[in-house]
Image (cartoon, coloured by chain):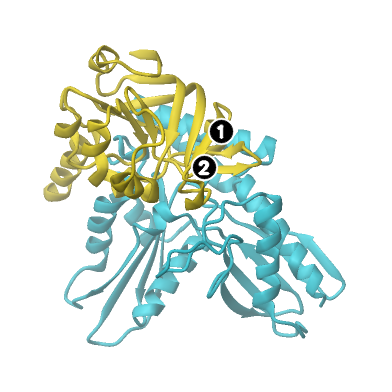
Chain colours: A yellow, B cyan
Amino acid sequence: MEHRLKIPLTGEDVEKLRAGDVVLLSGTVYTARDKAHAVLRDREAPVDLEGAAVYHCGPLIRDREVISAGPTTSGRLTRYTGEMVDRGVRAIIGKGGLPGAADVLRGRAVYLAYPGGCGASAARKLLVRAVHFQDLGMAESIWEMEAADLGPMIVAIDSHGRDLYQEVGQSVQERLKRR
Amino acid sequence: MRRSDVVQATLSAVHRAQTSLPPWVEDLIRQAEERERDPVARSQLQAILENVALARESRIPICQDTGLPVFHLQVGREARVDFDLQEAVADGVRLATEKVPLRPNVVDPLSRKNTGDNTGRGMPRLMVETVEGSGIRITAFPKGAGSENMSLVGMRNPADDPLDYVVQEVAKRAANACPPVFVGVGIGGTFDQAAALAKEALIRMPGTSDLDRGLLQRINSLGIGPMGLGGDTTALGVRVETACCHTASLPVAINMQCWANRMASSVVEEEGWSTD
């Protein structure tokens, strides 16, 4: 099933998404990766994260123009999932999944997979509105971007406990054992 | 040869590597898309192909992770170089950072301070090989972190099967390396030699030996699929390079590479440079 959703996302928006569905998002998206997440542990968020979509992305930007902006590996940021969702984040966008986070997301948020490496395509859907924590450098700053139908993304972990990566991982282990 | 030619040839190779995938890589992705039976997997491969076409037409980097500046240099035995080659290539990288543009990715490993221009101690990384001739062939081989982070060297027990080890490690690692991946494998040599062989294997991709094809088939039978979401296409290519090793050792290195096996070359001669 395909969903076109507007950010901020509500609990109902998230509730109706099922693993394997396709999502296109419009509205404000915040990029955040390793350093931004670490800094947010000690500092107030410079933006309102209620219903927000956080994009695991270190974009390539020139003069505020988004040149290339695909997802980074979410696995490094799994440890921050709980605190981000506690702050109201409803959608985490990235690649590779959030191992073991399905229970943290349950009833509250989803994980959306954007095809890794597709930075040129993503850039077409994103406009820079503002930048926060710019001292962290281009890749690590929080870029506040306006998304227009960002996607297609796959609901890889839904809010009902289903995690596609975990399912694939289990099947891979079984295939390895069968050999 | 002229230093300015090396600088310009480097800039050009980096620009082409970042914005257009080698045609054989794109062909492998297209063939995989045609074969793929899983609809989600097919959608990921289609998204990749659209992205590659868009980057080429707009001359913008395929991926925002423009990688670490890695180069393979084939230096002719009769090449006359009266300048610091490392510094000349570094100047090309600095220019490329501005002009392509590249994301500043290079940081000090301890302070984590970004150098701002993608150069620094040990960067760019040059892999130098001596060949016949009087020119220098410069191949830009930008290496992204997502796949590099999933690479490893294992000092195995000589009684173990190195191929089983490769399949098991790829099974654990491929999902985070932006699959469908290329898997460079170095078996034998010393600890560091195995790692260098694995990286060379990526530059010499695709593998065509029975060993390479057998490993490719085993990896694709795992079902990890594009982006780890399941499917028939986990790897696009596997290549094994070997060196003799100590009778008590079995070094096995796996250098993972995302679907974007980016590379492009320039040739510098005495009288000037050209694209290759």
Are marks 1 and 2 in one subunit? Answer: yes
Q: Closest to the observer: B243 or A89?
A: A89
Q: Quadrant of residue A44?
A: top left
Count of marks placed on residues: 2
Q: Quadrant of residue B76?
A: bottom right
Left or right side of B24 for A73: left
How busy is the neighbourhood of tag 1: few (under 14 within 10 Å), some, or many (20 plus)? many
Secondary element at image label 2:
loop
Which residue was labeled with disc 1? A123
Query: Disc 2 residue type?
Result: Pro
In the image, residue A14 above or below residue B79: above
Q: Closest to the observer: B97 or B172?
A: B97
Q: Position of residue A155 (x, y in %)?
A: 31, 25
Whether label 1 touches label 2, CB < 8 Å: yes
Secondary element at image label 1:
helix
How far apart are the alpha carbons under marks 1 and 2? 9 Å
Left or right side of A10 for B240: right
Q: Of label 1 and label 2, which has the lower sequence position? A: 2
Which residue was labeled with disc 2? A59
Question: Disc 2: which chain?
Answer: A
Query: Disc 1 residue type?
Result: Ala
Left or right side of B45 for B152: left
In the image, residue B19 above or below residue B113: above
